């Protein structure tokens, strides 16, 4: 339908980006695509800048179930079908062919109408810079100006021009993501361009809050999320570290053996925790905890600014800001306790993610075990009597209930109370 509309108005319509790459990679020539990127271009001259928006608006009228979002500044429009839980969501982005010029490096691209070739040239990697013509299909309908098909065959991630990473440092993370996900390698010169961009200080613009480039931090966070939630996150992190790209998070950040140890411990913890406690506990956001562990490896005074910069949620920012204080408190108090109730009394002040972070950072096995025991067992123990039982036993409802139940819980944790009889005897 989109192609029909485009033809009617004298435009060409192209499928571009990841969908073309994935179609060419798929062995059967068919696959389920959830994100479709379309580009509109004029036949003999550049289409007018509003073409993509006009096409998306017409499509939305034709498919009223889709939601239409228009991004005015970039002259792009998105159609989203996702309301029906029976179906997977489907998103279609429609843009007008454009070239992006960057007013200064790492800024948001500005837009002007241009032809499809230039549109493809502004993209990140050759394998993402091919287009499949959907209107008035010529043979062959595939436009591959930069050798994308060849790079798919030789399995390499190759950038289109030397400045690509300077213009958009998040492409370093994208390159790593595609390389690991597809089992490809980064082409040698592309690796040189990445190193050049990093050596020339491109990370300053990503790692430091810059009111001129707020979208850059958002994109960096999105890329980090993609990488850290993927099953291949370890290899991705190693490759980023080899390239020196972790500096984009903070200039001092390195994948030291200690951080690797913590991340391994975190994995074990997350796996065991999900198996044993998935129903009772708030869901742990795995990628975010990995990122928190990574950020926690930076000196304490930089953690909060880095988390803010990446626009992480408030609770994460606060956790990272309080981490050192909480860790010191727990590490110094736990060894002095000889009763479980004391451990519970202390640890219940902290949220689950904080305790997991502290446990993985802690080198003392006994302390780690106590935190783990608290999280999996002690935190869930209840006293054998409830408020109703107290009423039945003749206690008058009131604030003393809380006190009695707290004392009862402590006695249960410490093994003094073991059942209802010992509980009743205890409160008398
Ligand atoms: N793109 C780019 N530079 C970026 C982000 C995106 O050049 N920093 C271009 C690429 O051509 C990419 C297209 O925009 O193919 C769409 O971006 P996106 O949907 O993020 O990536 P996909 O290639 O579709 O990857 P994925 O399969 O992971 O969705």
Image (tube, rainbow, N blue to C red):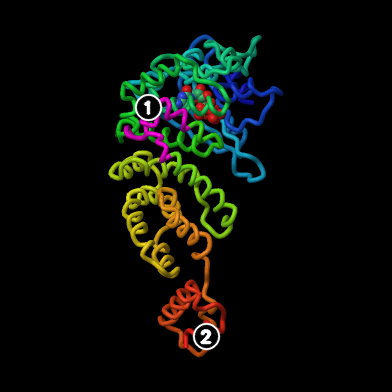
Q: Distance between the residues labelled 1 and 2?
A: 69 Å
Coordinates of residue 232 in the picture (x, y in percent): 54, 34
Relative to 248, 409 lies left or right: right
- Of helix, strand and loop, which one carries label 1? loop
- Which quadrant of the structure image shows residue 230? top right
Q: Which mark lies nearer to you, 1 or 2?
A: 2
Q: Position of residue 146 (x, y in %)?
A: 52, 11
In this figure, which residue is indicated by the disc labeled 1?
108
Determine the residue positioned at 36% across, 18% down. Answer: 196
Q: Name the residue under label 2.
A: 424
Check residue 155 for magenta coloring.
Answer: no
Whether residue 53 is visible, yes or no, is: no
Q: Can residue 39 be seen in this view?
A: yes
State the residue at coordinates (37%, 31%). 248
Residue closest to the far left:
301
Magenta stretch containing residue 248, yes or no?
Answer: yes
Q: Pick whichever, 235 or 64, lies toward us.
A: 235
User: What residue occupies the far right of the structure in this picture?
Assistant: 28
| Figure check: 99 above or below 73 | above
| 186 versus 87 height, above or below | above
Label number found at residue 353: none
Does residue 196 sit above or below 139 in this rendering?
below
Q: For mark 2, does the 10 Å Cα neighbourhood hold few (<14), some (14 to 19), or many (20 or more) residues? A: some
Which residues lie in the magenta part?
237-259
Mark before the other along the chain sequence, 1 or 2: 1
- How many marks the image carries: the answer is 2
Tell which residue pokes out farthest to the bottom in this image. Answer: 394
């Amino acid at each position: 339908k989109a192609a029909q509309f485009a033809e009617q108005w004298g435009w060409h319509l192209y499928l571009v980006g990841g969908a073309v790459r994935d179609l060419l990679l798929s062995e059967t020539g068919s696959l389920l695509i959830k994100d479709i990127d379309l580009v509109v271009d004029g036949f003999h001259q550049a289409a007018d800048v509003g073409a993509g928006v006009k096409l998306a608006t017409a499509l939305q009228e034709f498919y009223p179930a889709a939601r239409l979002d228009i991004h005015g500044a970039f002259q792009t429009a998105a159609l989203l079908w996702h309301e029906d839980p029976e179906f997977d969501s489907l998103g279609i982005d429609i843009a007008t062919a454009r070239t992006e010029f960057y007013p200064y490096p790492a800024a948001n691209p500005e837009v002007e109408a241009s032809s499809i070739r230039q549109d493809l040239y502004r993209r990140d990697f050759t394998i993402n810079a091919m287009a499949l013509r959907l209107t008035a299909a010529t043979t062959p309908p595939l436009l591959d100006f930069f050798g994308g098909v060849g790079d798919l065959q030789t399995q390499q991630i190759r950038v289109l021009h030397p400045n690509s990473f300077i213009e958009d440092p998040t492409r370093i993370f994208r390159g790593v993501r595609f390389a690991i996900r597809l089992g490809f390698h980064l082409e040698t010169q592309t690796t040189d361009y990445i190193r050049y961009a990093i050596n020339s200080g491109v990370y300053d613009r990503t790692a430091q809050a810059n009111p001129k480039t707020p979208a850059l931090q958002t994109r960096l966070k999105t890329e980090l999320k993609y990488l850290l939630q993927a099953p291949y996150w370890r290899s991705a992190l190693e490759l980023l570290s080899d390239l020196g790209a972790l500096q984009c998070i903070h200039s001092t950040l390195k994948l030291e053996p200690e951080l690797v140890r913590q991340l391994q411990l975190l994995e074990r913890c997350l796996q065991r925790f999900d198996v044993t406690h998935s129903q009772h506990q708030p869901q742990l956001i795995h990628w975010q905890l990995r990122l928190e562990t990574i950020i926690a490896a930076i000196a304490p005074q930089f953690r909060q600014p880095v988390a803010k910069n990446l626009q992480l949620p408030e609770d994460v920012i606060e956790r990272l800001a309080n981490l050192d204080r909480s860790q010191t408190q727990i590490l110094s108090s736990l060894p002095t306790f000889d009763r479980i109730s004391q451990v519970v009394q202390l640890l219940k002040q902290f949220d689950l993610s904080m305790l997991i972070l502290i446990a993985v950072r802690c080198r003392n096995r006994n302390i780690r075990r106590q935190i783990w025991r608290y999280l999996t067992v002690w935190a869930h123990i209840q006293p054998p009597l409830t408020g109703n039982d107290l009423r039945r036993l003749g206690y008058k409802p009131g604030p003393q209930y809380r006190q009695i139940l707290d004392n009862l819980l402590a006695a249960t944790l410490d093994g003094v109370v073991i059942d209802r009889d010992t509980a009743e005897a205890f409160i008398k």
